[in-house]
Amino acid sequence: MHLAHLNNTRRTIRFGQARLTIEDIVAIAQQRAGAALSSDPAFRALIGRGADFLDRLLREDGVVYGVTTGYGDSCTTAVPPELVAQLPHHLYTYHGCGLGEHFSPAQTRAILAVRLASLSWGYSGVSMALLEQIVRLLDADLLPLIPSEGSVGASGDLTPLSYLAAVLCGEREVWRQGEQVPAAQALMEAGITPLRLRPKEGLAIMNGTAVMTALACLAYDRADYLMRVTTRITAMASFALDGNAHHFDDVLFSVKPHPGLQQVAAWLRHDLPTDVWERNGKRLQDRYSIRCAPHVIGVLADTLPTFRTLIENELNSANDNPLIDPIGERVLHGGHFYGGHVAFAMDGMKNAVANLADLMDRQMALLVDSRYNQGLPANLVGATGARASINHGLKGLQISTSAWTAEALKLTMPASVFSRSTECHNQDKVSMGTIAARDCLRVLELVEQVASALLITVRQGVWLRCRDDPDAVPHAALAAMQAWLAHDIAPVEEDRRLDAELRLLLERIRGKAWELYP
């Protein structure tokens, strides 16, 4: 079986002032890369300069939001000098109110990496010791146990990031080798000394878009591969349905100049040479779920570059408040914690991805229906003779696929339009970016389930087409895909449960097991 090559070489991604990519964050999340701080003296000097400037302001009785004042609407409350050092502890303590499922270890690594990226730009007034502590957590794979619910996405991901701040100081809990362990114990056993946060460091850790941006990086990575899987499924469905490969003609697509749409059509031409259709085509025009597949998949293909720009710009931003200008020595109060760009990317992505589920669901409906599948058995039953009467093939699988598709479509309501005024109307317009990102990941999960069902379906459909028509020979790419699937899935000749095979195919999709198009 020719599965995609997995590169086991662990590389190091350096955090400083070099631009990072989505792939960098995904690599750290999946433990294919480690994190390290830049050794550039200029970078280290810039970090120190911002922290030193804040220290000077404090000594000179300067007023700095979140350092010598309360937070949010409490910014008019002055904090006595002798209590300033306790303020960060109170910030992460009172935000310890998250609920819901905990982020997975991979998601948590991504969150730590994204927060480290933002703080490393040198405009947050934090110490090098704080940055080094985050790297230590990643190196030891001691991952804060972070509840997924409780962020409105402006003033950043306050509640979830409070769990990072607390763990850096030896409080709350961590994941360690799949188990929940008190942070104090885990740090002690790893030889890591808990931090005592400097005056602005609690705010710098928590007041940013790290959670939504980390989830967005992971979502982008999954959506890109799912686009390719859906294209290959479409090619196999077209072959199984004895479809018309001329629907993907290069001249036809040259006059609709969306680059992503044209790329999907080119991939389909690669999989479905038109000379095959000259031999066996029966319909002049296939139904829309086949004929218009490039127009559906192409929407995601054409918007992914825009989503990448939005996500990576956020990833490479200093997004807490206030920002500290270490060169001009100014305190800059603003709203960079607002996650509107990520929210828009996630709301848009989940819409485009959910449409893939709808497309595949319609393709499955054609494949299992003897009125439309060009001579294949109803429900793609593989049994023959008398035994065909008691077999139901993929009937149950289609029902489950319809359920997953409906749930994915239901979740396409944009989260970003549901802003809620909070915190005494200080946070009176918020992004809901983290909710949008969580929704997008759930949509991706459901659509991957639909894709796993369709892989079983097209594997069965191609097998039946070739069994019943000796002249039906798939092109090299489809023959290879059929062989890869045959390694995991036997033909359904007698009814059997399929859940274990569906879960295996989900692992293949999420692990990018197949080499699908350059």
Image (cartoon, rainbow, N blue to C red):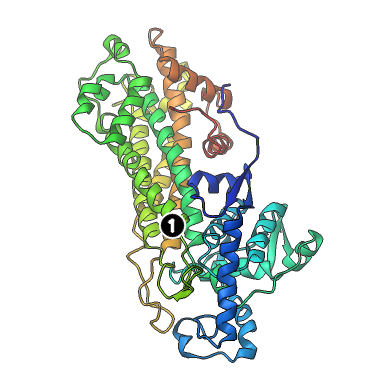
**Where's residue 334, x and y in %?**
40, 73
Q: Nearer the viewer, residue 372 or 262?
A: 262
Residue farthest along the left direction in this orientation: 255
Vertical order, 272 against 301 (above or below)? above
User: In terms of image quadrants, where is residue 189?
Assistant: bottom right
User: In terms of image quadrants, where is residue 5?
Assistant: top right
Vertical order, 245 against 316 (above or below)? above
Instruction: Please state if 380 lies on the left or on the right of 200 as rendered.
Output: left
**Where's residue 362, x and y in %?**
33, 36
Instruction: Please state if 506 lies on the left or on the right of 473 as rendered.
Output: right
Residue that label 1 marks? 314
Bin the neighbour count of mark 1 within 10 Å (Cα to Cα): few under 14, some 14-19, many 20 and up. Answer: many
Q: What residue sits 36% from the left and 77% below the top? A: 428
Residue type, mark 1 in image: Glu
Vertical order, 59 against 307 (above or below)? below
Q: Nearer the viewer, residue 462 or 216?
A: 216
Q: Nearer the viewer, residue 371 or 170?
A: 170
User: In terms of image quadrants, where is residue 498?
Assistant: top right
Q: Tell me the quadrant of the picture where the C terminus can be found.
A: top left
Mark 1 element type: helix
**Where's residue 384, x and y in %?**
46, 17
> Is residue 427 visible to us here?
yes
Q: Tell me the quadrant of the picture where the N terminus can be found.
A: top right
Instruction: Please state if 218 lies on the left or on the right of 295 as rendered.
Output: right
Q: Nearer the viewer, residue 18 or 109?
A: 18
**Where's residue 98, x and y in %?**
56, 70
Q: What residue sits 34% from the left and 47% below the top? A: 306
> Is residue 411 visible to us here?
no
Q: What residue sits 36% from the left and 40% below the top? A: 356
Instruction: Please state if 423 lies on the left or on the right of 297 as rendered.
Output: right
How many labels were placed on the picture? 1
